[in-house]
């Protein structure tokens, strides 16, 4: 009877000797070392393990161990960089309280006194541009027809009045810009809103800058000015 144990049996013994994660069939460095020791224990004295093969296995073990250590170092480095970046973002966001920001968004704050300014960006030349303003319930309160407009950025302000000229109550209102070209095809339009940051919150949804009751993600901010 041969003294050489089947390689699969040796591998299984090594796996059993070193517990791994549930369902894992991957040898970690401890199991790999046990595999080498088990091979030496069960080798046939009359036909010992080839020295070149043994050297290759030792080199593989050394490489695996180095890769594991490199992976640990990179993971720790990424965690440190992530914590540093988060700290910087938090500090920047906190510094925006009281500042006026401009960001991609669809809501504007009407204070009841000062006109609410906003910008919109057209991706192409438009034959007709229309701005609809709705209250928080979704009711249309004002429509502004702008006629033909060139591609690019455009600035506009709203005086807080509805289509009949009546002054509306202070609050948050929703913008919608629609544009069509000479053929009647729609043209993409993005709105840029402004407002003073009242507070900042940090949570699972990310960093949010609040303008009244309207939250704007930090990554949507495109500009900052003094109050």
Image (spheres, helix red, strand yellow):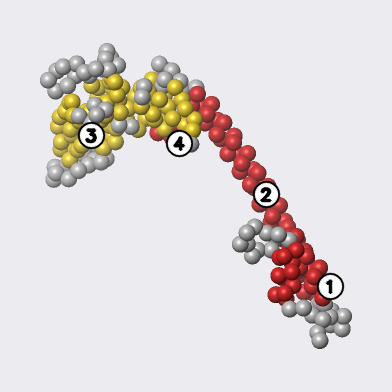
- Give me the C-alpha separation between circle 1 and circle 2: 32 Å
The reply to whether residue 161 is in sight is yes
In this rendering, which labeled residue sits more in front, label 3 or label 1? 1
In this rendering, which labeled residue sits more in front, label 4 or label 3? 4
The reply to whether residue 153 is in sight is no
Mark 4 or mark 1, which has the lower sequence index? Answer: 1
Identify which residue is drawn at 63% across, 47% down: 75
Label 2 SS:
helix
Label 4 SS:
loop
Q: Which residue is mark 1?
A: 41
In this rendering, which labeled residue sits more in front, label 3 or label 2? 2
Q: Quadrant of the N terminus?
A: bottom right
Q: Which residue is mark 3?
A: 177
Q: Which residue is mark 4?
A: 205
Mark 1 or mark 2, which has the lower sequence index? Answer: 1
Give the answer, above or below, for where 19 lies relative to 124. Answer: below
Residue 12: % across, % down: 71, 70
Residue 10: % across, % down: 74, 72
Question: Would you say 164 lies left or right of 210 here?
Answer: left
């Amino acid at each position: 009877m041969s003294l050489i144990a089947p390689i699969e049996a040796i591998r299984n013994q090594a796996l059993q000797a070193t517990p791994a994660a549930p369902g894992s069939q991957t040898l970690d460095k401890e199991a790999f070392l046990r595999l080498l020791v088990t091979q030496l224990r069960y080798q046939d004295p009359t036909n010992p393990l080839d020295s070149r093969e043994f050297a290759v296995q030792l080199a593989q073990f050394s490489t695996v161990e180095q890769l594991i250590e490199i992976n640990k170092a990179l993971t720790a480095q990424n965690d440190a960089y992530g914590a540093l970046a988060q700290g910087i973002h938090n500090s920047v966001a906190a510094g925006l309280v009281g500042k006026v920001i401009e960001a991609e968004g669809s809501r504007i704050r009407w204070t009841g006194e000062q006109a609410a300014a906003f910008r919109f960006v057209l991706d192409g030349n438009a034959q007709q541009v229309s701005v609809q303003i709705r209250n928080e319930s979704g009711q249309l309160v004002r429509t502004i027809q702008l006629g033909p407009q060139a591609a690019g950025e455009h600035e506009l302000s709203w005086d807080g009045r509805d289509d009949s000229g009546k002054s509306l109550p202070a609050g948050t209102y929703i913008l919608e810009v629609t544009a069509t070209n000479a053929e009647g095809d729609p043209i993409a339009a993005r709105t840029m809103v402004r407002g003073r940051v009242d507070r900042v919150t940090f949570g699972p949804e990310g960093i949010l800058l609040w303008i009244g009751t309207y939250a704007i993600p930090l990554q949507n901010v495109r500009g900052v000015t003094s109050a």
